[in-house]
Amino acid sequence: MTPAPTLAELEAARDRLVPDVVADGLRVLFCGINPGLMTAATGHHFARPGNRFWPTLHASGFTPRQLHPSEQSELVRHGLGITNVVARASARADELSDEEYREGGRILEEKVLRLRPRWLAVAGVTAYRVAFGDKKAKIGPQTRTIGETRIWALPNPSGLNAHWTLPAMAEEYGRLRTAAEAEG
């Protein structure tokens, strides 16, 4: 196993870009807020040990086993992908400006129109609200679409989002999985 990045390596990863895990026509394109420093240092999405994305993905039935962040490329085999609202890495999402969110939303919309996933799942309702100018959005399916792509706002799996437990997140992600499976 690769040793964890040092503090200096994490700080050097600030503002780094992390490649998306995508393909045309995915079932669900998961969208984080922006890469954290651990993600940027390792090149693996949702890589911080306290992040609950990978356990939630498995617990909700999207993957047959819990994947390690280093196995992120396996998601495409399951019709899943990962991108971010804002591409640049930071230590915390509160380091991002509303302008970055709005520009990220514009870029994300172009990406979704090009890749045509059935669902865009934004993991962070506050990021979704700012990026798409929908101040009243709540967790769950949204009325807005991007082309033919439906949108679902999910709870942010960050360990900092403590009021969402792993079982509650798995239930909400599972609702999305059920909806995605019902569409074929």
Image (cartoon, helix red, strand yellow):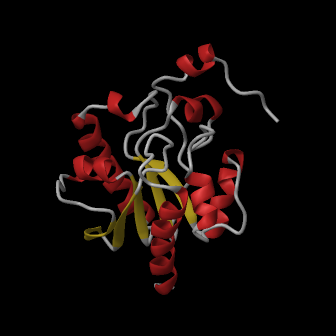
Q: Nearer the viewer, residue 173 or 9?
A: 173
Residue 148 horizontal/vertical position (percent): 33, 74
Q: Residue at x 70, y 49 (%)?
A: 68
Residue 43 horizontal/vertical position (percent): 62, 36
Q: Quadrant of residue 5?
A: top right
Q: Nearer the viewer, residue 62 or 107?
A: 62
The residue lying furthest to the top in this view is 8
Q: Residue at x 35, y 71 (%)?
A: 150
87 on left or right of 57: left
Q: Residue at x 62, y 41 (%)?
A: 44
Q: Quadrant of residue 4?
A: top right
98 on left or right of 139: left
- Count how many numbered circles sit on residues in the image: 0
Looking at the picture, does residue 123 appear above or below residue 33?
below
Looking at the picture, does residue 140 appear above or below residue 36?
below
Residue 40 horizontal/vertical position (percent): 56, 32
